[in-house]
Amino acid sequence: MKSATIIGSGIIGLTSAIALQEAGFRVKIIAKEPFQISLSHKVGAIWFPFEIAPKEKTNTWATNSYIRYLQDLTFPSGVSIIPFINAYIEGSNTDWKEQLPPGTVREAKKEELPKGIDQALYAEVPLVEPGIYLPYLFNQFLTYKGQFELAKISSLEEISELDGLVVNCTGLGAKELCHDKELYPIRGQILRCEKLDSISFADPTKKGALRYVINRSSDTIIGGTDYEHDWNPEINPEDTTLILNRIKDSGISEPPKVLEELVGLRPKRTAVRFEFDEDYPNVFHNYGHGGAGYTVAWGCALELTEVLKEG
């Protein structure tokens, strides 16, 4: 039996681990923090290709992830399919719509559009609730006899000395670990609110003025911010005000009741790093998924499995 070690316990790390287990690998996860405090635990996690490149690979990964999420619908996994309005303008990547199942995406009608959105796609897409899905995945990992260890890895050389093949799923942590000049944060601040009576939507068409509403089973995530190269992990009250004002401008007149304010740093890269390391041939990199980690995680994991099976 081949062995593999995954570095990182977020959505990229967990899906990579399980896909390899399903292919017959013996897998261990090493992470500096448990999944409960990872970036993946505090995001909106709707299927939406946001701030990720290259789009040719992204669209394939996103499609394969969509198909995998459909398999989870039969379990109490925290995955559901919901209607979602995706705003776009000239030059936006809307190629992903061509790869969705027939009848699941169409042009949004004028009366369906939130205020301030001129054109959008109406799609039936997977919504993942991290507080349910991540424990579901972790328990699956343990059921497949996976091992988990909390430890901080400080260098690529240290990674390369671990047992078997090693997959680097450290997200923004790869900035320091790999001295990666192409990797940088996009700071996202969001609000978890009491559930709203509104369709879920996202409008990423204005840089620096991202706005979205994601309705979950018992609450709503509203956002957000998309500040590039911003390393601030703290809540900014001014951003909270901006988010609430943008939602009001979208036609939601009743002020949402805020339950929690959250900040996460999305790991953006000029292109997802999905390759073997040049200097350490037993190390494979799988990081830099921007704001689309949940959207492409399973697609990346399944392709990763095929690559490592051949290696």
Image (cartoon, rainbow, N blue to C red):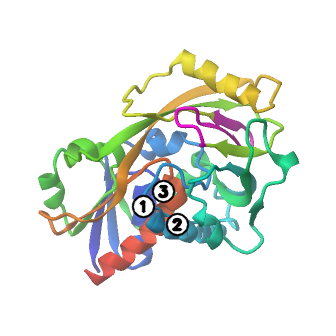
Q: Secondary structure at mark 1?
A: loop
Question: What residue does disc 2 label?
Answer: 59
Task: Give the x, y percent position of residue 21.
Answer: 41, 72
Label 3 – label 2 distance at C-alpha = 26 Å
Spot occupied by residue 124 in the image (x, y as percentages of width and height): 73, 60
Magenta region includes residue 19: no
From this viewpoint, which residue is outermost toward the front? 90
Q: Which residue is mark 1?
A: 54
Q: Position of residue 177 (x, y in %)?
A: 21, 46
Q: Quick check: 272 left or right of 211?
A: left
Circle 1 residues within 10 Å: few <14, some 14–19, many ≥20: few
Q: Nearer the viewer, residue 16 or 115?
A: 115
Q: Residue lying furthest right in this view?
A: 111
Q: In this rendering, is residue 89 above or below 277?
A: above
Q: Is residue 141 left or right of residue 213?
A: left
Of the image marks 3 and 1, the number of the one nearer the N terminus: 1
Amino acid at the residue labelled 2: Asn
**Residue type indicated by callout 3:** Phe
Q: Residues within 10 Å of mark 2 (few under 14, many from 20)?
A: many
Say whether marks 3 and 1 touch (CB < 8 Å): no
Tag 1: amino acid: Pro
Position of 294 with respect to 181 (left or right) is: right
**Residue 138 - label:** 3
Gap in angstroms between the C-alphas marked 3 and 1: 29 Å
As measured in the structure, the alpha-carbon distance from the residue carrying label 2 to the one carrying label 1 is: 9 Å
Residue range highlighted in magenta: 204-222
Front position among marks 3 and 2: 2
Mark 2 or mark 1: whose residue is earlier in sequence? 1
Residue 202 percent across, percent down from the top left: 66, 44
